[in-house]
Image (cartoon, coloured by chain):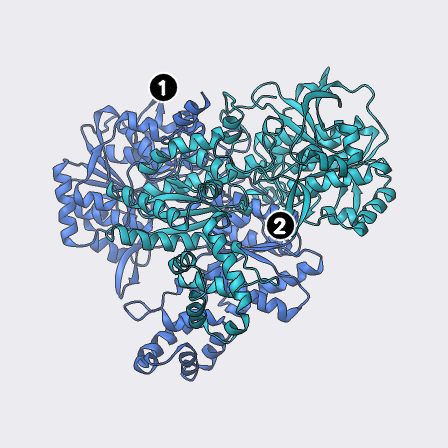
Chain colours: A blue, B cyan
Amino acid sequence: MIKDLLISTEGHNSLFEQEIKQMDIPTCKVFLKDGALLPVGFEEEGTELYNKDTLKVNEAFKNSVSESGNKVLKARATNLTAKSGLNVAVLFSGGPAAGGHNVVVGLKRILGTNNKLYGVKAGPKGLLKGDLFEISDKDILSIANTGGFDYLGSDRTKIKTDEQFSMVKATCKKYELNAIVVIGGDDSNTNAAVLAEYLYDMGVQVIGCPKTIDGDLQVGDLLPISFGFDTATKIYAELVGNILQDTPSSRKYWHFIKLMGRSASHVALEVALQTKPAICLISEEVEEKRLSLDDIISSIAKVVVERSKKGINYGVVLVPEGIIEFIPEMKHLVAELNDKVAEFSSVLANKDKEEKREFIYTKLTAENTKLMASLPDYIEDMLLADRDSHGNLQVSLIPTERLIIEMVQRKVKEMDSSVPFNHQQHFFGYEGRCGAPTLFDAAYTYNLGLTAGSLILAGKTGYIASVASFDKEIKILGIPLTGLLNIERRHGHDEMVIEKALVKLDSPAFQFFESRRDDWASSDLFNSPGPRQLWGPSAKQMPMTVALNRVYSTLKFDY
Amino acid sequence: MIKDLLISTEGHNSLFEQEIKQMDIPTCKVFLKDGALLPVGFEEEGTELYNKDTLKVNEAFKNSVSESGNKVLKARATNLTAKSGLNVAVLFSGGPAAGGHNVVVGLKRILGTNNKLYGVKAGPKGLLKGDLFEISDKDILSIANTGGFDYLGSDRTKIKTDEQFSMVKATCKKYELNAIVVIGGDDSNTNAAVLAEYLYDMGVQVIGCPKTIDGDLQVGDLLPISFGFDTATKIYAELVGNILQDTPSSRKYWHFIKLMGRSASHVALEVALQTKPAICLISEEVEEKRLSLDDIISSIAKVVVERSKKGINYGVVLVPEGIIEFIPEMKHLVAELNDKVAEFSSVLANKDKEEKREFIYTKLTAENTKLMASLPDYIEDMLLADRDSHGNLQVSLIPTERLIIEMVQRKVKEMDSSVPFNHQQHFFGYEGRCGAPTLFDAAYTYNLGLTAGSLILAGKTGYIASVASFDKEIKILGIPLTGLLNIERRHGHDEMVIEKALVKLDSPAFQFFESRRDDWASSDLFNSPGPRQLWGPSAKQMPMTVALNRVYSTLKFDY
């Protein structure tokens, strides 16, 4: 009998999954009329987006801008003239994030029985290949509130070439598509903007939805956070909290924990606010304050030594995955090494590791020689050996935690050889992408789906759906994608792309962190946020960085 | 205002921690009389423990056995003649496990105001040093239902020498102790048995409590599981479930996940039952079936290739931390290498890596030569290089996941070079020791504390407290520690120790796993158990291995 019970849980059907699939999802009041779910109409919200590159972008996106005028839309009331008979396709793009399934659920429900919803298999690639299937009501019941992107799959194909655009057009024709919903990060929504412009003449609408666990797709009060960020950071924060709780229990280790997120440190900052560790590095601070590797290592070692004097020979250090790439002097060193290795490639080819190092030292500037000499031997070897086909070293290949641990160990020994320094290292990444969504992400994404569907039924194209004002009456928004584009140098030429939102040092969240971190470093003030709860009194919590940056007075969200 | 809220969460005071500290803990009815919490008395349960070494153990533990007769006790009713005026000390021993704090809470509450409870700081070491402090009611409010051992701290000191015993006696005198509660694993409870015998003449009672996340302290129906196992496995199972959910979302990787637990594979088995991955290795099976490294690698590679034929180029493999030490041929190889390296130490001293390898090949048996040659080079180098002060190689130093991944990669290529094999590796260990306890562990440990306190107030010594029959009316038991001792060869001489409970291949839990694993390997049948819930409809779940092995008909526990 217990065996039958266990077998019945196979295939996405654990007791937990059974319960969350049936759980009510909070719905923004504007979508409800006499208890029925109905699409909303839109009106101008009052904001017109503008940046340094707007004129050039307007030129390149004539169709989209002529429609939107780069003006933000907000939901008004039930849309009594909503379209019907539409064929809509939805796809996931890029790495998975919790809540993606609920966007599909929201879309399906708001499109109702008068329209068809197709799922695109395996991301943008599926759109090119025309690999679509119709999403049924039954499917929706089995994916509500579950984590992952497995219902559709995803990939990282970028749609750029004329051939690819033709393939998309063919797919649109094959399925008589009226609209496409792209669920993805900054690059995927850039793609959505381009597709919207390109498919405008065909009458195919394109709407984006903001997804990324990194949290770097944000537009101030208009788009406070991308979905998936809350779940990922709450998963990491539980684990960091558990390890923090372990430190004074076993009183033995410094734990260095690398957290996923190559470009921005939102994840590290949020996890730090959730848990209060001894140290949390922020890549944007390193870059802006032009900190050297030695500055970083010394500041950590100093905390290790000072805590040891109080008998605290343990602690936790949070390290953003991409930190090395933000250290200015490391970039200079790598740049000079790239030049020198290319210049002297024939000389270097016949040398062994030792000889290579000796030779290259004679070619570097004094500053870079000093930095190079401070690195562990195996890192020096890496810097001289592993180059890609363009002759460049990928800074991201450097094993960050190991480098930092070894250099801190050396520095602590120099400062006070009596200080014990035992260490463990961790990397939390994949664990956080596909967990079941938090209540915050579950509600946010479902309402995003309702919003994206409503934008389509209102005939809109080239917008990213957004849900904002989490603390009080929720705002349902459509933000013109063209208003988010700016011009950046990528792969050697200018491209119009959505700017990644980095941690700002003058933001309330960073400034709060800055005001508390010395206390967290000097004594144990950590807490354990615990596993994310779907029921009970602590279940309704939004990200702390969002509450701080948007100047809310509560962590609770309200639909 | 939001800043004040965040600052108020510092120091173990997250919103989650605030709530769990106030949460009601289920209490076994036998401890309740007219709503008041009262200690229970004990009577014989009907079981007398006996094993092959009982006569010898009885000889060595005359005091304890004369009292207990190795007979198991069960709670009867309120103890109307409970002792009072006692001074009781409690300590944590070994690695932390979730629920330890609740044992202290239960102890404090059941000892009431008529007795004093002392906390021993930093484990057995604190008992030697006499580092004790009185536990207050206020303290108890701040640790209820929280994870970790940080309230007292812990260490791994073994109390063995005469000098150490004298120090313990001095501490007992200093604090006028009447009883000591030792919260620990198999070795710590062996220690508790020895202390009980040794302190018998002084009239100091000793009671043990079964803790270990490894789950290898079990005594059939009498002690179905140690505390901490449920929380640790549910934490790991959530993470494994998240990664499983990631595999068909991104469709890219085989994830190899090493799970903490050196001796037994209970953790891996439980996590496999919770999540249903493609593959889970069980150390005890490897040993009992005398599987070779090649058997293991081939069986994994076969699954990789077969899934690939169905278009499934991803999956999850669970690997118990200690697996390498269970492979018979690896033990033989290491033993022979230890001999040869010692025999030819002077010859080897002057050789470089390459020469060492070539030389040693001429000295090994054909079987070991073959095995050695199948290993990656860096493992070969390790096997020849890193020896401890006794000239032995620690098999446990071999980087298990890396070895398995590299050998599987090679094997897959041999079998079918067109099969893609991208991989990621993870190790889950520290994350699981100090999380907030599951409802199961929270209730179990609180009632363990009530039981240990009741045994003390009933004048008992040399017992391990236990809570059993989780599915129906809970049983409160005292199990004589001497009845669990057997004689094992350790460090070259016979010692009386508690036997580690390993996974039995004829147990219902393993057999169920065995009956399902081919299906789990051939197609995706996984589920995500989700984060452990403290509230809501899926919160009350015991370990699946316990429910299967004890032949319960439900996963719900009932107090």
Q: Are marks 1 and 2 in contact (CB under 8 Å)?
A: no
Say which of B529 and A541 sits in front: B529
Image quadrant holding the N terminus of chain A, namely: top left
Q: Which is more toward the observer, B329 or B478?
A: B329
* Above or below for A361 versus A501: below
User: Which residue extends farthest top?
Assistant: B34
Q: Secondary structure at mark 1?
A: loop
Which residue lies at the image location 33% right of the left edge and 50% below the top edge? A186
Residue A25 drawn at (x, y percent): 41, 28
Amino acid type of the residue tagged 2 in the rendering? Thr
Is B48 displayed left or right of A432 in the figure?
A: right
Q: Quadrant of the C terminus of chain A?
A: top left
Residue type at mark 1? Asp
- Labels 1, 2: one chain: yes
* Residue B185 visible somewhere in the drawing: no
Which chain is disc 2 placed on? Answer: A
Where is residue A467? Give x, y as percent.
38, 38
Tag count in the figure? 2
Q: Is disc 2 placed on a helix, strand or loop?
A: helix
B230 relative position to A491: left or right: right
Disc 1 or disc 2, which is closer to the eye? 2
Which residue is labeled 1 in the image? Answer: A34
* Residue neighbourhood size for the residue with mark 2, other residues' Cα within 10 Å, grouped as few (<14), some (14–19), many (≥20): many
Is residue B559 visible to us here?
yes
Q: Residue at x 46, y 33 (%)?
A: B510
Residue holding disc 2: A247
